Amino acid sequence: MTAAPAAGATLVTGIGELVTCVAEPRDRDLGIVRDAALVVEDGRVAWLGPAADAPAADRRLDLEGRAVLPGFVDSHSHLVFDGDRAAEFAARMTGERYDGGGIGVSVAATRAADDDRLRELVRRRVAEMRAQGTTTVEIKGGYGLTVADEARSLRIARELTPETTFLGAHVVPPEARGERAAYVELVTGPMLDACAPHARWADVFCEPNSPHAFTEEESRAVLVAARDAGLGLRVHGNQLGPGPGVQLAVELGAASVDHCTFLDDADVDALVDAAGTTVATLLPGVEFSTRSPYPDARRLLDAGVSVALATDCNPGTCYSSSMPFVIALAVREMGMTPGEAVWAATRGSAASLRRDDVGRIAVGGPADLAVLDAPSHLHLAYRAGVPIARTLVTTPSAAE
Ligand code: NIG
Ligand code: FE
């Protein structure tokens, strides 16, 4: 998901608020430049600063006072699936609990889809994200759960992003129930071998509170094998109740532990010690869609934990691809300031992917930009539900 290369330079003027996010991570300072301009050339930022100092360029694009931010970095999504689970969502709204059992429904539908259909579904979901200002996306497999279906899911995801994640340990699939050990051997052996060439990361649903997910020991086996195969690590941890996921992620130096809904003091201490290595990625769209309590973001931020925000876009726990929606939830429900939420959705989530090039706007970096039909980033939460964010396209040939 990178901007199309520009032929010649474009001077973008009329930027009411330019949010650069270039400060040191511990400061979480948005680095705002008001009445700004920037020059984009060959898909990169060639210059930025006060509009009064702007150089000449081949073309001009006047944003008439709109805010420009780093494109959102959605560091956790499960876009490779077929099938519909809207009825499961509706049942939850009237009191059903989520335990991961519905994943099997998506697995059956995904296995039945041919390559062209699956590719088109993923492509459309990525386009939906991009239309809302997301310029970097991580995509997990996890709805194939056979060697061939996981490899195919990652091959398709790789066509759209370099941030692909092997999630053979999403749940124990129906045909392997009662043979958990054999399934973990499949995941750590032939499935990992077939998937590693198409993946940058590996992830595991470490959740003793679900009969479908993986225990601490099973999760450790999967993560160690993946690390030995050269993959970076991510963990679904502490989503449905207290558990070992956070501490396991920190122990193994994972780049991110995601959900972090149920944390005790030792979990928070571990995340504080691991700040700069393991990011706590919060996914409040999941709490919205499962009626769980929201994670305590204020506690994590005040303690000094590295925090990111992402959608977790998936057919079960959050079928929303909207980073602005996530930012609004983080502000309204998790005690984050609008600035902290924007940081977590850009620079913070870039850190969870160990990326220093995206999630910020700097000279020499990619022109992965979001623009708001609003004068400041405050409007992302203030105008919740209104589609004010989009990816900024600066090339005339790719006119929106
Ligand atoms: O991140 N928790 C595990 N995986 C997904 C949900 C997958 C599904 O229900 O389809 C999550 O919440
Ligand atoms: Fe997830």
Image: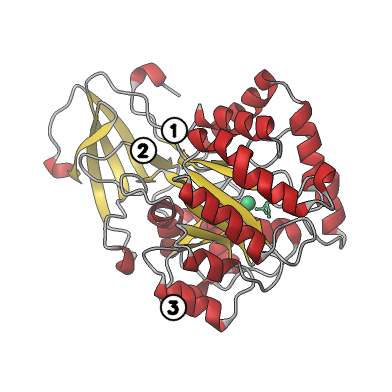
Q: Is residue 378 visible?
A: yes
CA gap, disc 1 to disc 3? 33 Å
Residue pictured at 37% horizontal, 40% vertical? 369
For label 2, the residue is 368
CA gap, disc 2 to disc 3? 30 Å
Nearer the viewer's eye, disc 2 or disc 1? 1
Q: Which comes sooner in the sequence, label 1 or label 3?
A: 1
Circle number at residue 1? 1
* Crowding near the residue tagged with mark 2, few <14, some 14–19, many ≥20 C-alpha atoms within 10 Å: many
Instruction: Give the quarter of the image for residue 5.
Output: top left
Identify the element where label 2 is drawn: loop
x and y, in percent, of residue 135 in the image:
44, 38
- Asked if the residue at tag 1 contacts the one at tag 2, i.e. Cβ–Cβ closer than 8 Å, the answer is yes
x and y, in percent, of residue 355 in the image:
36, 48
Q: Is residue 86 visible?
A: no
Ligand 1 under 8 Å from disc 3 Cβ: no
- Asked if the residue at tag 3 contacts the one at tag 1, i.e. Cβ–Cβ closer than 8 Å, the answer is no
- Where the N terminus falls, by quadrant? top left
Q: Amino acid at mark 3?
A: Asp
Ligand 2 under 8 Å from disc 1 Cβ: no
Residue pictured at 68% horizontal, 50% vertical? 184
- Asked if the residue at tag 3 contacts the one at tag 2, i.e. Cβ–Cβ closer than 8 Å, the answer is no
Circle number at residue 302? 3
